Image (cartoon, grey):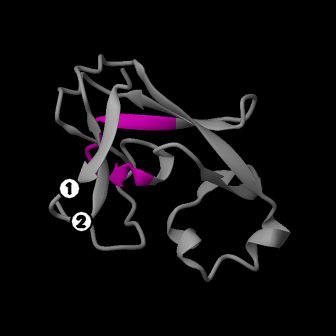
Amino acid sequence: MRPIVVKDTKKYGRGVFATRLIKKGELIESAPAIIIPMEEWENMKDSILSNYVFRWKKDKAIVLGYGLLYNHSYSPNAYYITNFDHYSIDFYARRDIHKGEEIKVNYNGDPLDQTPVWFDVIE
């Protein structure tokens, strides 16, 4: 059974939720990445995709799976790493995440980074 599911957050659209206890340090999801070279990104940057990209060296990446649906938090219960060797964004539990709890990451990449993001944070 997959440890995550997508549901309506009742506050800000869809989000990713735990279907069982996910232990601290556990891999939640390895989301495959599609790399978008910077020169191609120039044609896409004004689209809705600009809200869903990850940095990938000098380029950008769109991830598959549930990767684009994790919501942001300045006190996240998960984090992600860019896995260049496997062309994926890997999501890990930062602490134990209980069944039914929404899984959130800090969009700045570092769970402790408090730099403002490009939208109003609801929390």
Q: Quadrant of the N terminus?
A: top left
Secondary structure, mark 1, is loop
Badge 1 vs badge 2, beta-carbon distance below 8 Å: yes
Residue at x 27% of width, y 24% of height: 95
Residue at x 75% of width, y 29% of height: 85
Please state the horizontal and vertical placement of residue 24, each as a whole percent of the image.
Answer: 32, 18
Residue at x 18% of width, y 37% of height: 101
Secondary structure, mark 2, is loop
Q: Residues within 10 Å of mark 2 (few under 14, many from 20)?
A: few
Q: The residue under label 1 is which amino acid type?
A: Thr
Q: Is residue 43 magenta?
A: no
Q: Residues within 10 Å of mark 1 (few under 14, many from 20)?
A: few
Please state the horizontal and vertical placement of residue 33, each as a whole percent of the image.
Answer: 66, 45
Specify whether 53 is left or right of 97: right
Which residue in the protein does label 1 denote? 9
- Residue farthest toward the front in the current orientation of the protein: 1
- Structural distance between the alpha carbons of marks 1 and 2: 6 Å
Asked if residue 117 is positioned above or below residue 83 in the image, the reply reads: below
Which residue in the protein does label 2 denote? 12
Asked if residue 117 is positioned above or below residue 76 in the image, the reply reads: below
Q: The residue under label 2 is which amino acid type?
A: Tyr
Residue at x 74% of width, y 49% of height: 57
Please state the horizontal and vertical placement of residue 69, each as a whole percent of the image.
Answer: 41, 52
Give the magenta range.
Answer: 69-80
Q: Quadrant of the C terminus?
A: bottom left
Asked if residue 75 is positioned above or below residue 99 in the image, the reply reads: below
